[in-house]
Amino acid sequence: MKSPTVRVMAAAEEDLAIETVMLAFAADPMARWTWPHAHQYLAAMPRMTRAFGSRAFSNGSAFCTDDYAGTALWLSPGVHSDEEGLGAVLESTVAPTLAPETTAIFEQMATYHPTEPHWYLPLIGVDPAHQGKGHGDALMAYALARCDHDHAPARATFRSTDATASNRSARSRSVRRRRWSRCCGGRVELQFDRELGGIFFTGFSKTRS
């Protein structure tokens, strides 16, 4: 099977990237715990995506595969998410009963960012109709080649909200490690944290020496 082609997205394609992300995360446990009702999710997720990763478009680090089947919004060294925008989205869309824990989760994720210059992946998603066809791997490999060119590490954090995650942590670690190792040529470390009722998976791709 031919490997998907990856290219840099233009700023005018931002809406198309957001549509792919929305499809990819429509059944995501974390997203749907935050916004359990369809109308909540459809209203909030585009705003969240823009706050998290829209600066990728102005820095040439938003990537997609053929026909927008997959998209990855990377933030290059020195570029950060719109923290004020993220806060505004959470404040205006998350139910008051969930707000304290949601805020705590984002604060916990922030503690995993390295202090050294690095590439950060806040969002990557593949349209469910095209999953299992190599789009995610192609997006990761393309971006990590850029990281190597810049001699900068890459970081991505995932959180499992599965109630049985703690019982399946060994399997989860193995899956994450294999996926990152396949894309990174073995240059990978993973960290895990069982706080806040889930497991944080932090992939760290080292640059080649």
Image (cartoon, grey):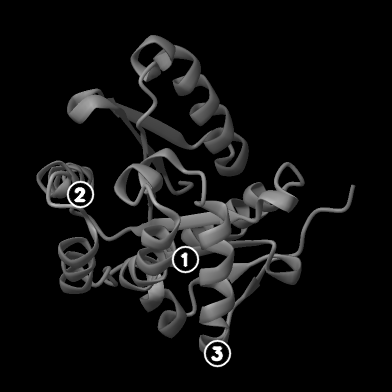
Residue that sits furthest to the top in the current view = 167
Inter-mark Cα distance, 3 to 2? 29 Å
Q: Position of residue 26 (x, y in %)?
A: 51, 51
Q: Nearer the viewer, residue 25 or 119?
A: 25
Residue at figure coordinates x 39%, y 52% from the top left: 37
User: Do the residues bearing badges 2 and 1 touch, measured as CB atoms within 8 Å?
Assistant: no
Which of these two is toward me, 118 or 30? 30
When asked about the image quadrant of residue 185, the answer is top right
Three-letter residue code for mark 3: Ala
Q: Who is closer to the viewer here, 167 or 209?
A: 167
- Residue at the far bottom: name it: 12
Which SS class for mark 1?
Answer: strand
Write down the residue under mark 1.
Answer: 73
User: Residue 151, can we see it?
Assistant: no
Q: For residue 106, which numbered disc appears in the image?
A: 2
Amino acid carrying label 1: it is: Leu
Question: Callout 3 environment at 10 Å: few (<14), some (14 to 19), or many (20+)?
Answer: few
Which element carries disc 2, helix, strand or loop?
Answer: helix
Where does the image place residue 162, in percent across and percent down from the top left? 39, 26
Disc 3 and disc 2 in contact, CB within 8 angstroms: no
Callout 1 touching callout 3 (CB < 8 Å)? no
Query: Is 84 situated left or right of 192 in this image?
Result: left
Q: Which residue is mark 3?
A: 12
